[in-house]
Amino acid sequence: MAEQVFWEDVTEGMELPSLVKEPTTRQLVQYAGASGDFYEIHYDKDFAIGNKLDGPILHGALKSAFLGQLVTDWIGQQGILKRLQCQYRGMDAPGNAITARGSVTRKYEEDGQRMVDCSIWLENAEGQNTTPGYATVILPSRGG
Amino acid sequence: MSTPASFLTEEMRQQALGLESAPVTMEVEKGHILRFAEAIGDTNPQYCDEAAARKTGSGGIVAPPTFLRSVRGVNLELPFELSFSRRLDGGSDWEYFQPVRAGDRITAVARIAELSERNGRLGLMVFMTTVTTYTNQFDETVATQTNTLIAY
């Protein structure tokens, strides 16, 4: 675990530590079992091709889980995730590494809470943003 | 297979908007949280290490942010046949209000918030936006999830 980040340490424009994921078909089966989403486009190649796809694709919700981890890794145990949004614009296939990235877009106080908004996204090996989104978090203060 | 130019009518939209699912309740088991965290590849001790999790603000094992996706069987019964066999997930938007802890009993109710259609790369696509509200055993709303389903 990285050290706890505090609201005072954050500046607008700063990047979140990136997170590389290397999903496999095995992981998609594992995720299907854990989430209960057994839709065959995520692990059955013939079924996926019959659905006008090139092959199995990642569950959208697994991609949002990767973005969730990007944010929760950064905010540490004292940070609180308030909002996690993303759109599945491009498809990602098992066997291809994807990198979760983020940057701080706004730092502010609201109702006595120290808040940060982030732009977050998943980038494929070609550098394309397949899954844009944003997150809002509450961070602890050095002042307590 | 030919693609029709349009599927949705204003009448269908009016019938569907605001429709709610039956409530579904799921007990949050520690082992399920662990399996879910393993499946997404997240080794955060808050999900898997009771001793470490107790030292944090939440005071024990909590679920990862998207864990509530595993509440299955929240079915919205449309008053008409959505005659497209294929489905894609368009995106999701979570808002969090309380942590989800091992041992919680979570009840989910989904509501149709939006229904529209558009022609795209995959032919005619229907977009259905649902809002699912998750409530714990103390009647606290723990999270809402707005999700867009694409049928094509």
Image (cartoon, coloured by chain):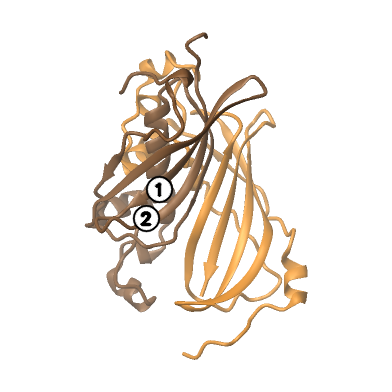
Chain colours: A brown, B orange
Q: Residue at x 48, y 61 (%)?
A: B89
Q: Name the residue under label 2.
A: A129
Relative image position of residue A91 (x, y in whole percent): 37, 62
Residue located farthest toward the left when viewing the structure as drawn: A95
Q: Name the residue under label 1.
A: A121
For the residue pair A125 and A84, the one nearer the viewer reads as: A125
The three-letter amino acid code for the residue at tag 2 is Asn
Give residue B95's quadrant in the image: top right
Relative image position of residue B128 (x, y in whole percent): 61, 64
Relative image position of residue B96 (x, y in whole percent): 58, 35
- As drawn, is B8 to the left or to the right of B88? right
The three-letter amino acid code for the residue at tag 1 is Trp
Q: Residue at x 72, y 66 (%)?
A: B16
For the residue pair B79 and A11, the one nearer the viewer reads as: A11
* Precedes in sequence: disc 1 or disc 2: 1
- As drawn, is B54 to the left or to the right of B105? left
Chain letter of disc 2 in the image? A
- As drawn, is A45 to the left or to the right of B124? left
For the residue pair A129 and B86, the one nearer the viewer reads as: A129
Q: Residue at x 47, y 11 (%)?
A: A142
Relative image position of residue A129 (x, y in whole percent): 37, 55
Q: Which residue is drawn at 41% across and 54% down?
A: A131
Chain letter of disc 1 in the image? A
Residue B11 visible to an observer of this rendering? yes
**Label 1 Cα neighbours within 10 Å, binned few <14 / some 14-19 / many ≥20:** many
Q: Quote the CA–CA distance across marks 1 and 2.
A: 6 Å
Residue A36 visible to an observer of this rendering? no
Q: Is mark 2 on a helix, strand or loop?
A: strand
Asked if labels 2 and 1 touch by Cβ distance under 8 angstroms, the answer is yes
